[in-house]
Amino acid sequence: MSDSNDHDVLVRLCQSVEDFHNETRRTLSEIKNDFKGKSSDHEDRLNRLESSNTKQNAMLWITLVVGGFMCALLIYHISGIKL
């Protein structure tokens, strides 16, 4: 009777170890997929920030050029210099 009981315990132990391995594989796979998704999301956000930064720099330069031109016209107008 003891041999049968030992066999049952061994079978349950083997099944438990196999279940543990399967759960570990599933968990690692989920972590890997989650990491890839977050990494991809961070790359997208960085790309959007970089293009936003480029747009802001372009707008700043346009504003500086137009503002400089307007200041020059204002100084010309106030000084009353005839060309």
Image: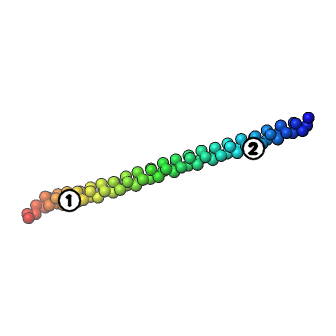
Q: Amino acid at mark 2?
A: Val
Please state the total of marks drawn on the protein image: 2
Q: Amino acid at mark 1?
A: Phe
Q: Badges 2 and 1: C-beta atoms under 8 Å apart?
A: no
Residue 71, can we see it? no
Indicate whether 31 appears above or below 71. Answer: above
x and y percentages locating residue 57 in the rendered image: 33, 57
Residue 37, can we see it? yes
Is residue 38 shown left or right of residue 73?
A: right
Front one among 73 and 7: 7
The residue that appears at 82% across and 41% down in the rendered structure is 10
Is residue 49 shown left or right of residue 76?
A: right
Q: Residues within 10 Å of mark 1 (few under 14, many from 20)?
A: few
x and y percentages locating residue 20 in the rendered image: 71, 43
Which of the numbered marks, if any, corresponds to residue 78? none
Front one among 66 and 34: 34
Q: Which residue is mark 2?
A: 17
Name, please, the residue furthest toward the top: 1
Q: Which residue is mark 1?
A: 69
The residue that appears at 87% across and 39% down in the rendered structure is 6
The residue that appears at 56% across and 49% down in the rendered structure is 35
Is residue 18 shown left or right of residue 30?
A: right
Tell me which numbered mark, 2 or 1, is placed earlier along the sequence: 2
Gap between marks 2 and 1 measured at Cα: 78 Å
Q: Secondary structure at mark 1?
A: helix
Indicate whether 13 appears above or below 75. Answer: above
The residue that appears at 91% across and 37% down in the rendered structure is 2
Name, please, the residue furthest toward the left: 82
Name, please, the residue furthest toward the right: 1
Q: Quadrant where the C terminus lies?
A: bottom left
x and y percentages locating residue 31 in the rendered image: 60, 47
Q: Secondary structure at mark 2?
A: helix
